[in-house]
Image: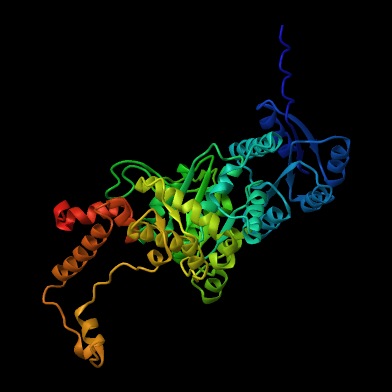
Amino acid sequence: MSEATPAAPTPRILVVDDEPDLREIYALTLIREGWEVAEAAGVAEARALLEQGAFDVAIVDMRLRDGEGMELLSWLAARHRAERVVMATAYGNAATAVQALKTGAFDYLTKPVDLRQLRQVVRSALALGAAVERARPTPALHALVGDSPPMRAVKDALRRAARGMAPVLIQGESGTGKELAARALHELSNRAAGPFVPVNCSAIPEHLLEAEFFGYRKGAFTGAVNAHDGFFAAAAGGTLFLDEIGELPLAMQAKLLRAVQERRVRVIGETAETPVDARLVSATHRDLARCVADGSFRQDLYYRLNVIGVTLPPLRDRLDDLPQLADALLARIRRDQERPALRLGDEALAALSRQSFGGNVRELENMLQRAAALAASDTIGADDLGAPAAAVTAPGERAAAAGATPPQAAMELPPDLPAYLDHVERAILLEALRRTRFNRTAAAHLLGLNLRQMRYRIERLGIRDDDAR
């Protein structure tokens, strides 16, 4: 007979609060979940219990009769204890909550504590502990190609940030891979089984922001023919990634701040707020500290989003990663273009190492896409990298090139601007299609478009296969 698998130990939860009624409510709620609960009324009593044995999670009130909850959090951190600490803070006490997260708290709850949120956060903390014990592999980081010192620092920062629920702000120039970093953070966390919901804040019309973020009920406004769950609801149990957070208008920043602070949103058309359960990760290419200084970004929101900061280095600062990056990008191009023998020649790699890469990894990818489309063989040479797409010169530019004085005086204005722009766009598309032997995917990459955008333009402009011959 095979031996029975030993049962997993019952999770142990420590509740630290100086109000007996609250301790009892928390304890009863947690016991109903099948967890073992111990109670302490203050810092000294909690330390005594912790010295007697380990707990999985500690729920600690910020203000206790014999001290501050932060004292207990610091005591645990100094001893490298494994307990995941959840701080209970007074309503609206944002600064204290942020300080707790920076000190090492797993998460925080705002008092009066919603019991459903209490159960959710304890489950998340227990799930993190199980993930750490399993020491699962982290393929999520493989997408962040490179082993240079700056990239090793980024990966270490993402691993540390994945251990809790603190908001994370990822900063870096355009094209450095901020969404890849956010996805890696999600997949490293205990929320990996939940949804990852990416949102491009700059792509949503201002009048739709509140409805898209928080959702609405049927009939809430003209045109609301069906109910709609917002981004926060869609990310329940997972991670909400707000890309280009610096593009949000100030009015929406104020509404987002309340949602972040109170962990609640008010769906349009409802009177009550709904608790939310989403890890918040934001990203921007802007210098948000400077935006705060010039008044275009709220200081209190910046403070809440930047609890843990991760900065992605530009490609020019990690050129040691260039061979790995080029190989990884070419692997994707080989699949897309069905050219398994495609490779980068030594001279081409040397030429790449001399580039400044203002557009970072995205620029490198575009260069390789263009070079692959132009290369006469499956070996990309240095000459292939230096061939930009043909430019179509506007009438005024032709006059300026011929030596005409001020462009304002010499510019030729087309009599039908829409028709002229269509003509220019059609010429560019046809040139890209000719260079890629009418491979629409390769032509799209050559122009910085995705395949859907390419198809739309081809159909709109009536381009046929024989037009490119």
On the rendered structure, is 373 left or right of 427? right
Which residue occupies 45% across, 48% down? Answer: 331
* Above or below, 430 relative to 259: below
- Which corner quadrant holds the N terminus? top right
Measured as percent of width and height from the top left, residue 131 is found at: 66, 36
Q: Is 39 located above or below residue 142 in the figure?
A: above
Looking at the image, residue 56 lies above or below residue 435: above
Residue 137 position within the rendered picture, expressed as x and y whole percent measured from the top left: 63, 39
Q: In which quarter of the image is the C terminus?
A: bottom left
**In front: 48, or 442?**
442
Q: Which residue shows up at 20% across the image and 85% down it?
A: 411
**Colouring:** rainbow
Between 252 and 281, which is closer to the camera in this rendering? 281
Residue 168 appears in view? yes
Q: Residue furthest bottom?
A: 405
Q: Please identify the residue farthest to the top as the structure is shown.
A: 1
Q: What x and y, as percent, mark residue 318?
A: 59, 64
- Can residue 257 be seen in this snapshot? no
Considering every residue shown, the one lying at the far left of the view is 415
Quarter of the image for residue 371 reads bottom left
How many numbered circles are shown? Answer: 0
Image quadrant in which you'd find residue 396: bottom left
Task: Pick whichever, 142 or 378, lies toward us.
Answer: 378
Q: Residue at x 74, y 19 (%)?
A: 6
The residue under the point 55% across, 68% down is: 316
- The x, y position of residue 309, in whole percent, is 62, 60
Is 450 rendered above or below residue 133? below
